[in-house]
Amino acid sequence: MNEKNSKSLKNGSYSILITLVVAVIAVMINLIVRGLPSQLTQFDFSTSRLYTLTGTTTDFLSGLDEDVTLYYICEGGKEDDTIRKLMERYEDASSHLTVEQIDPALYPAFTSQYSDEAVGNNSVIAVCGERYKVVNADAMYVSDFNYNTYSYVQTGFDGEGMVTSAIAYVTSEDIPVIYVLNGNGEAALGASFRDAVEKNNIDIRTLNLLAEAGVPEDAAGIVIAAPQKDYSAEITEKILNYLEKGGKAIIFSNYTADAMPNFDSVLSNYGVARDDGIILEGDSGRYMTYQYCVIPTVNYSDITAKVYGDSYLLAPMSQGIRTLDTYRDSITMQPLLATADSSYAKMDVQNMTTSEKEAGDIDGPFTVGMLIQEDINNDHEAETEIVYYSTGYLLDEDYNQNVSGYNAELFGSTANYLCNGEDTSSSVAVKSLQVQYLTLTDFSANFWTVVCVFVLPILCILAGTLVWLNRRKR
């Protein structure tokens, strides 16, 4: 072999060796990367972080001490990309979580042990021991009717909320029940508010006390949703009997032209009363569109933790919550929501001709949300607990939508606090698939109108004039 051939052979062997080394390194890097959690290798660039787990879920899963299997029901090649990535995030989030994809084409009878109905592609079944819960794929996407196109469009993704709720359900021993009173013109709970409660694995049932001997023994709490006519003495007695034995209640009230002495007696029994007037806000930065659409200040508590900070709530047509001069020493109170110093209450609502402050109107601030607790056993623990909001319009779906669902979030957190205690809620809000609502106060709306309509055009004209004058001098 001559020197030239020997040199070529040496160079060729060196190239092959380098190629093999690079290939081995590439394979090793690929294996290492595949073993890393998906959140480190796949980035969520979606606007609403659709498949990134929220702090609520990660905190809940960090305390998981039971093994849970999430069966991802889907035929191969028909995976919903968002749900698939969400399942990967769950499996990486806890050593107690296992995700198994089940192909219904290969195992057609698998879902029948968990549901009598058909379970569609991309559905999830959470299983822990003997408990299970089916989360259908169709239910993960929220759809609303579009009156412009006369068709339903997907507006939100609730995959994380429903799957986290399912995990909490299968790892819970008991599911509390909350009863919503009806029969006296109470406000009906809309879908957003029911979902906010049910995500905390609380069962919602209706209750007509006129037809029942009293509040059922399995009640973890009751909801009195702004009755439009007064309760009878019989119903009032049943409510008070329940509360005086350590019951829990969420109470809403609305302004009514007619007196409601029996309803008000429930409040006065726990040291509070509602003012007669309607609260208006004098500061344009503290209301939305109309002065009665008050944006209250949120005081931090276990109940309000999820809506504290940058979140907005709307408390339209609120009445002031007044603390009575005398009440039992066993009762304690904690304000949750309050109006600003600039607020005032119009007392003569029936004859009101102006929203301007007049003589006889009451100056704010006012409490519009109150936690009332009573230690009836004298053991330094609150047995009876009432959360009172002085407007039933907190439960209005339209107002809730205007603040991106935070009113419903508050209601869900309130129910969770009363029914499940101070445990951290596992409820996750729906992630929007549309443009997020920008909540503008009346002041902000006027400010940006002036800036966009007047200030910016004037600045552009001035800048153009300066450029023109500068060019003329040359």
Image: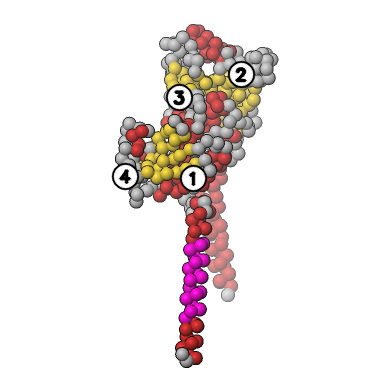
Q: Which residue is mark 2?
A: 383
Q: Pointers 4 and 1 in contact (CB under 8 A)? A: no
Q: Determine the residue positioned at 56% across, 57% down.
A: 459
Q: Quadrant of the C terminus?
A: bottom right
Contact (CB < 8 A) between labels 1 and 2?
no
Question: Mark 3 sits on what residue?
Answer: 204
What whole-number distance in Å separates the C-alpha atoms at marks 4 and 3?
38 Å
> Closer to the camera, 473 or 99?
99
Amino acid under disc 2: Glu
Give the SS element for disc 3.
strand
- Give the extent of the magenta segment: 12-29
Q: Which mark sits nearer the N-terminus, 4 or 1?
A: 1
**How far apart, in angstroms, are the residues tagged by discs 4 and 1?**
23 Å
Residue kind at label 3, given as amino acid type: Ile
Q: Earlier in the sequence, mark 1 or mark 3?
A: 1
**Which residue is the site of mark 1?**
91
Seen at 48% across and 49% down, the residue is 47
Marks 1/3: CA–CA distance: 31 Å
Q: Residue at x 58, y 73 (%)?
A: 473
Q: Please say if the residues under marks 1 and 3 sit with CB atoms less than 8 Å apart.
A: no
Query: In terms of secondary structure, where does tag 2 sit?
Result: loop
Choose mark 2 or mark 4, whichever is in front: 4
Is the residue 39 above or below the residue 259 in the image?
Answer: below
Q: Position of residue 251 (x, y in %)?
A: 53, 21
Q: Nearer the viewer, residue 431 or 285?
A: 431
Q: Nearer the viewer, residue 367 or 134?
A: 134
Q: Which of the marked residues, 4 or 3, is nearer the chain's N terminus?
A: 4
Classify mark 4: helix, strand or loop.
loop
Query: In the image, what residue occupies the spot 47% across and 92% down?
Result: 2
